[in-house]
Image (tube, rainbow, N blue to C red):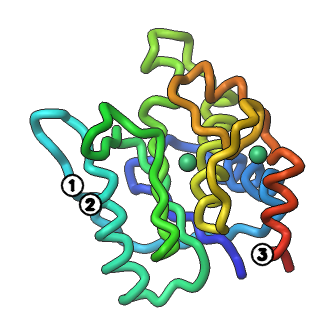
Amino acid sequence: MSINILWDQQRPEGIELPVARMIEMILGKETGLVKYPFLVDGYDRDRNQHDAQQILDRMQDTLTRRYEIAGPLLLITPRDLYVNGCDFVFGLARPASSVAVVSTARLRNDYYGRVPDDTDLVDRAAKEGAHELGHLLGLGHCTDPECVMFRPRTLDELDRKRKVLCPVCREALRPWEG
Ligand SMILES: [Zn+2]
Ligand SMILES: [Zn+2]
Protein backbone atom coordinates (compact mmCIF):
# COMPACT_ATOMS: atom_id res chain seq x y z
CA MET A 1 0.00 0.00 0.00
CA SER A 2 1.54 3.27 -1.05
CA ILE A 3 0.94 6.71 0.43
CA ASN A 4 -0.37 9.38 -1.92
CA ILE A 5 0.54 13.03 -1.60
CA LEU A 6 -1.40 15.74 -3.40
CA TRP A 7 -0.18 19.34 -3.42
CA ASP A 8 -2.43 22.35 -3.65
CA GLN A 9 -1.82 24.26 -6.89
CA GLN A 10 -0.96 27.29 -4.74
CA ARG A 11 1.86 25.45 -2.96
CA PRO A 12 5.19 26.91 -1.88
CA GLU A 13 7.76 26.23 -4.63
CA GLY A 14 10.46 23.60 -4.42
CA ILE A 15 9.61 21.74 -1.22
CA GLU A 16 7.60 18.81 -2.61
CA LEU A 17 10.50 16.41 -2.95
CA PRO A 18 12.27 17.11 0.38
CA VAL A 19 8.95 16.88 2.26
CA ALA A 20 8.09 13.56 0.57
CA ARG A 21 11.55 12.12 1.33
CA MET A 22 11.33 13.13 4.97
CA ILE A 23 7.83 11.67 5.37
CA GLU A 24 9.15 8.41 3.90
CA MET A 25 12.02 8.47 6.39
CA ILE A 26 9.71 9.07 9.37
CA LEU A 27 7.12 6.44 8.46
CA GLY A 28 9.41 3.99 6.67
CA LYS A 29 7.04 3.89 3.70
CA GLU A 30 7.07 4.86 0.06
CA THR A 31 5.11 7.86 -1.07
CA GLY A 32 3.82 8.76 -4.50
CA LEU A 33 2.81 12.10 -5.94
CA VAL A 34 -0.71 12.32 -7.32
CA LYS A 35 -1.64 15.14 -9.67
CA TYR A 36 -5.29 15.97 -10.08
CA PRO A 37 -7.13 19.20 -10.51
CA PHE A 38 -8.56 19.75 -7.06
CA LEU A 39 -10.74 22.60 -5.88
CA VAL A 40 -10.01 23.57 -2.29
CA ASP A 41 -13.31 24.80 -0.92
CA GLY A 42 -14.71 25.55 2.51
CA TYR A 43 -13.49 29.16 2.52
CA ASP A 44 -14.93 31.29 5.33
CA ARG A 45 -14.72 34.96 4.38
CA ASP A 46 -15.16 36.22 7.95
CA ARG A 47 -12.35 34.08 9.35
CA ASN A 48 -10.19 34.19 6.20
CA GLN A 49 -9.66 30.47 6.76
CA HIS A 50 -10.76 27.20 5.20
CA ASP A 51 -12.91 24.63 7.00
CA ALA A 52 -10.73 21.50 7.14
CA GLN A 53 -13.78 19.23 7.43
CA GLN A 54 -15.19 20.59 4.18
CA ILE A 55 -11.86 20.02 2.43
CA LEU A 56 -11.88 16.40 3.63
CA ASP A 57 -15.51 16.04 2.45
CA ARG A 58 -14.46 17.16 -1.03
CA MET A 59 -11.39 14.92 -1.04
CA GLN A 60 -13.51 11.96 -0.01
CA ASP A 61 -16.26 12.59 -2.56
CA THR A 62 -14.26 13.75 -5.57
CA LEU A 63 -10.96 11.99 -5.32
CA THR A 64 -11.66 8.61 -3.84
CA ARG A 65 -14.71 8.11 -6.07
CA ARG A 66 -13.76 9.72 -9.34
CA TYR A 67 -10.09 8.81 -9.38
CA GLU A 68 -10.21 5.62 -7.32
CA ILE A 69 -7.05 6.33 -5.38
CA ALA A 70 -5.96 3.35 -3.32
CA GLY A 71 -4.22 3.96 -0.02
CA PRO A 72 -3.97 6.97 2.28
CA LEU A 73 -4.21 10.40 0.65
CA LEU A 74 -2.66 13.57 2.08
CA LEU A 75 -3.33 17.06 0.72
CA ILE A 76 -0.78 19.76 1.53
CA THR A 77 -2.12 23.30 1.17
CA PRO A 78 -0.88 26.80 2.04
CA ARG A 79 -4.39 27.83 3.13
CA ASP A 80 -5.02 28.41 6.81
CA LEU A 81 -7.34 25.79 8.30
CA TYR A 82 -9.85 25.64 11.14
CA VAL A 83 -12.40 23.20 12.49
CA ASN A 84 -15.50 24.18 14.46
CA GLY A 85 -14.47 24.91 18.03
CA CYS A 86 -10.80 25.57 17.19
CA ASP A 87 -9.12 28.82 16.14
CA PHE A 88 -6.89 26.88 13.79
CA VAL A 89 -5.49 23.42 13.09
CA PHE A 90 -2.13 22.47 11.57
CA GLY A 91 -3.91 19.55 9.92
CA LEU A 92 -6.78 17.09 10.14
CA ALA A 93 -7.18 13.39 9.36
CA ARG A 94 -10.26 11.28 8.71
CA PRO A 95 -9.09 7.67 9.10
CA ALA A 96 -12.50 6.18 8.18
CA SER A 97 -12.07 7.43 4.61
CA SER A 98 -8.26 7.56 4.58
CA VAL A 99 -7.96 11.27 3.72
CA ALA A 100 -6.01 14.00 5.51
CA VAL A 101 -4.97 17.62 5.01
CA VAL A 102 -2.05 19.68 6.31
CA SER A 103 -1.67 23.45 6.08
CA THR A 104 1.69 25.15 5.67
CA ALA A 105 0.21 28.56 6.61
CA ARG A 106 1.32 28.45 10.26
CA LEU A 107 4.44 26.39 9.57
CA ARG A 108 6.20 29.36 8.00
CA ASN A 109 8.56 31.51 10.03
CA ASP A 110 7.21 34.68 8.42
CA TYR A 111 3.76 33.95 9.87
CA TYR A 112 5.33 34.64 13.28
CA GLY A 113 7.47 37.56 12.13
CA ARG A 114 10.61 35.42 12.01
CA VAL A 115 13.13 35.16 9.16
CA PRO A 116 11.81 32.80 6.44
CA ASP A 117 13.67 29.48 6.22
CA ASP A 118 12.76 26.67 3.82
CA THR A 119 14.55 24.09 6.00
CA ASP A 120 12.24 24.89 8.91
CA LEU A 121 9.24 24.77 6.59
CA VAL A 122 10.22 21.38 5.14
CA ASP A 123 10.84 19.90 8.62
CA ARG A 124 7.50 21.09 9.95
CA ALA A 125 5.49 20.12 6.87
CA ALA A 126 7.05 16.64 6.96
CA LYS A 127 6.39 16.20 10.69
CA GLU A 128 2.77 17.29 10.38
CA GLY A 129 2.28 15.36 7.14
CA ALA A 130 3.67 12.20 8.76
CA HIS A 131 1.49 12.88 11.84
CA GLU A 132 -1.76 13.03 9.84
CA LEU A 133 -0.72 10.02 7.73
CA GLY A 134 0.05 8.22 11.00
CA HIS A 135 -3.62 8.66 11.94
CA LEU A 136 -4.64 7.20 8.57
CA LEU A 137 -2.40 4.21 9.32
CA GLY A 138 -4.13 3.62 12.66
CA LEU A 139 -2.01 5.58 15.12
CA GLY A 140 -3.50 7.77 17.84
CA HIS A 141 -1.95 10.66 19.71
CA CYS A 142 1.20 10.05 21.71
CA THR A 143 2.18 11.55 25.07
CA ASP A 144 5.90 11.64 24.20
CA PRO A 145 6.53 15.33 23.32
CA GLU A 146 9.36 14.33 20.95
CA CYS A 147 7.27 11.79 18.99
CA VAL A 148 5.76 12.74 15.63
CA MET A 149 2.36 11.55 16.92
CA PHE A 150 2.40 14.09 19.78
CA ARG A 151 -0.27 16.71 19.16
CA PRO A 152 1.38 20.16 19.12
CA ARG A 153 -0.70 23.17 20.05
CA THR A 154 1.98 25.75 19.25
CA LEU A 155 4.85 26.13 16.81
CA ASP A 156 7.35 25.61 19.63
CA GLU A 157 5.70 22.32 20.57
CA LEU A 158 5.85 21.31 16.93
CA ASP A 159 9.54 22.21 16.72
CA ARG A 160 10.27 20.21 19.90
CA LYS A 161 9.11 17.05 18.12
CA ARG A 162 11.83 15.02 16.47
CA LYS A 163 11.52 13.63 12.96
CA VAL A 164 10.87 10.12 14.27
CA LEU A 165 8.16 7.94 15.74
CA CYS A 166 8.81 6.87 19.33
CA PRO A 167 9.37 3.09 19.81
CA VAL A 168 5.76 2.57 20.95
CA CYS A 169 4.27 4.24 17.86
CA ARG A 170 6.75 2.54 15.56
CA GLU A 171 5.75 -0.82 17.01
CA ALA A 172 2.05 0.05 16.57
CA LEU A 173 2.70 0.82 12.89
CA ARG A 174 4.22 -2.57 12.22
CA PRO A 175 1.03 -4.40 11.16
CA TRP A 176 0.81 -1.94 8.26
CA GLU A 177 4.34 -2.58 7.10
CA GLY A 178 5.15 -4.51 3.99
ZN1 LIG B 1 -3.27 14.27 15.47
ZN1 LIG C 1 4.79 8.01 19.98
Q: Which residue is drawn at 67% across and 48% down?
A: 19
Amino acid tagged 2: Gln
Q: Residue at x 70, y 77 (%)?
A: 2
Proximity of marks 1 and 2: CB atoms separated by less than 8 Å: yes
Q: Residue at x 53, y 19 (%)?
A: 109
Give the image location of residue 43, x and y in percent: 19, 48
Near-viewer residue (146 or 9): 146
Kindly indicate the quadrant of the structure image that contains residue 60.
bottom left
Residue where numbered disc 1 is placed: 42
In which quadrant will I find the C terminus? bottom right
SS class, disc 1: loop
Tag of residue 54: 2
**Gap between marks 2 and 3 measured at Cα:** 28 Å
SS class, disc 3: helix
Q: How crowded is mark 3: few (under 14 residues within 10 Å), some or many (20 or more)?
A: few
Amino acid tagged 1: Gly
Residue where numbered disc 3 is placed: 176
